[in-house]
Each structure stands twice: as C-alpha cells, then as structure tokens.
Image (cartoon, rainbow, N blue to C red):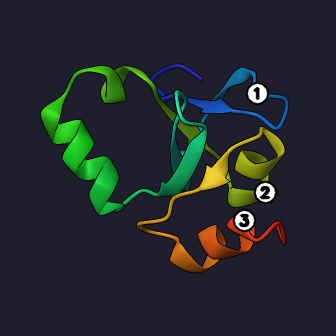
Amino acid sequence: MTGSKLYTLIGADGGRYSSPTKGTFGGYRKERRYGRLDCKLARRALENGGLYAQQRVFFADEATAIAAGYHPCAVCMPDEYKLYKNGKR
C-alpha cells in the first residue's frame, strides 16, 4: 500500500487497527462516548485543544462503537442517547 493513507480505528474489541478507509463516527476515549463527525460538542472541544484531541478515537460504524463499549453523544445523537439512557440500547 505504498502512498496510501492508513487511518487508525477502534475495533469491536476496543483495540486499534489500521484501515485504508476513514471512520464514520468519532469518539472520546475518556468518557467512552461516540458521535457524528460533525458534532458541535466535539468540534468545540477540538478547537480548545488539550486532552480531548489526545483522547479522540474513530470507528468504522456505529455498531462497532457500541460493541467497543461506547455510548452515543447527547448533543449530536439525541434520539440514540435517549434510548441508551432508558436501557433500550
């Protein structure tokens, strides 16, 4: 794969792996939260730099984020977050 960009994603087991495809969801390792890549909360945190950027992770899809033990973001995924909080997810 000479010249190809590889992305580091988190798998269902919580381990890291390289992928030629970008992740479709981002996450914050410290709080085990995942959300959309255009999340306002994540963007604000990234603009401030610091710990959030260091704890940022990516997932191939939502099912993988859930399997790795992450929960949905209340800001960018409010419906999914409500299901999670009510134990239906």
State which tag comes first along the sequence, 2 or 1.
1
User: In this figure, which residue is indicated by the disc labeled 1?
Assistant: 14
Q: CA separation, marks 2 and 1?
A: 12 Å
Image coords of residue 47 (percent x, y): 15, 40
Image coords of residue 39 (percent x, y): 36, 61
Q: CA separation, marks 3 and 1?
A: 19 Å
Q: Quadrant of residue 56?
A: top left
Q: Quadrant of residue 10?
A: top right
Q: Nearer the viewer, residue 15 or 82?
A: 82
Q: Quadrant of the C terminus?
A: bottom right
User: In this figure, which residue is indicated by the disc labeled 2?
Assistant: 63
Residue 21 visible at all: no
Q: Amino acid at mark 2?
A: Ala
* Cβ–Cβ under 8 Å for marks 3 and 1: no
Q: CA separation, marks 2 and 3?
A: 13 Å
- Give the mark toward the camera: 2 or 3: 3
Q: Nearer the viewer, residue 84 or 50?
A: 84
User: In this figure, which residue is indicated by the disc labeled 3?
Assistant: 84
Going 52% across and 75% down the picture, which residue do you hit?
78
Q: Residues within 10 Å of mark 2 (few under 14, many from 20)?
A: few
* Left or right: residue 67 compared with residue 80: right
Q: Secondary structure at mark 1?
A: loop
Q: Residues within 10 Å of mark 1 (few under 14, many from 20)?
A: some
State which tag comes first along the sequence, 3 or 1.
1
Q: Amino acid at mark 3?
A: Tyr
Q: Nearer the viewer, residue 2 or 28?
A: 28
Going 72% across and 65% down the picture, which residue do you hit?
84
